[in-house]
Image (spheres, grey):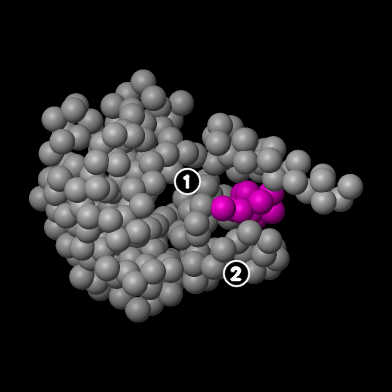
Amino acid sequence: MEMLLFIIGIVIIYFIYQKGQFTFFTKIIFRGNDKEKIIALTFDDGPQPPYTENILKVLNKNKILATFFLLGENIKKHPESVKKIISGNHEIGNHSYSHKKMLFKSPDFIQKEIQKTDEILKTYKIETKIFRPPFGVGLLILPFIVKLFEKNIIIWSINSKDYLGLSAEKISERILRKIQPGSIILMHDGSGVDSGNRSNTVETLKIIIPQLKKMGYKFSTISNLPLK
């Protein structure tokens, strides 16, 4: 019976997450307003040179602001990359300290993962109000703890799957096929689990940005993205 109740609970949470309506503890955002052609590019697992810098060059050339969900470990390793993100006026979000899954983790573990990265970001005078859990997963305890940090949880509506070693053309095709008003696009400038080569992500941006502009889309950071 206990196992059955557990499975039912997981299913309920999954459907609530999919609908993007789970606000009992903190707001969980999957997409923006589907009435406006405004979208958000987001990059996880960085910073990681040279890919963060190369992504910034493409974004800055196109006068686009994006949101970077950074890992505490990588912030400590690559402080100059963090400074470049900040100097470009891009938004920074908390992506945990070590990129470990938060599914079935203790409240103390989750709290420390968020707090450690927050403390590092404060040394750059950054106090972010957005958090993206590693792999985008967590149970009821996660929204509760994130609420204590006065943050919203940001997921995504389009997973580029740029971490699978796909060509830039394949990644671009996937994004352009799925794009809708209000889309939050997940990409990566660093590595949480794989080899970490993000050259394909850089090349993908060079393909999709002109196409999306031609389709009438504008770009926003997460905090400025119009919501439903």
Q: Quadrant of residue 184?
A: top left
Indicate which label's residue lies in the foreground, 1 or 2: 1
In the figure, 109 relative to 222: above or below? below
Report whether 171 appears left or right of 130.
Answer: left
Residues at marks 1 and 2, CA–CA distance in whole angstroms: 20 Å
Q: Which residues are magenta?
A: 137-148
> Does residue 149 show up?
yes
Report whether 107 appears left or right of 165.
Answer: right
10 Å crowding of disc 1: few (<14), some (14-19), many (20+)? many
The secondary element bearing badge 1 is classed as loop
- Residue 175: where, in percent of width, then height? 29, 41
- Residue 82: where, in percent of width, then height? 30, 67
> Does residue 223 show up?
no
Q: Which amino acid lies under the numbered mark 2 shown in the image of this protein?
A: Lys
Residue at x-position 47% and y-position 46%: 155
Residue at x-position 66% and y-position 51%: 139
Q: For residue 155, which numbered disc appears in the image?
A: 1
- Residue pushed farthest bottom? 77
Q: Earlier in the sequence, mark 1 or mark 2?
A: 2
Main secondary structure along the magenta-highlighted residues: helix
- Residue 45: where, in percent of width, then height? 39, 63
Queried whether the magenta region covers residue 19, the answer comes back as: no
Queried whether the magenta region covers residue 140, the answer comes back as: yes
In the figure, 18 relative to 76: above or below? above
Q: Which amino acid lies under the numbered mark 1 shown in the image of this protein?
A: Ile
Residue at x-position 19% and y-position 35%: 212
Residue hosting label 2: 112
Residue at x-position 16% and y-position 55%: 203
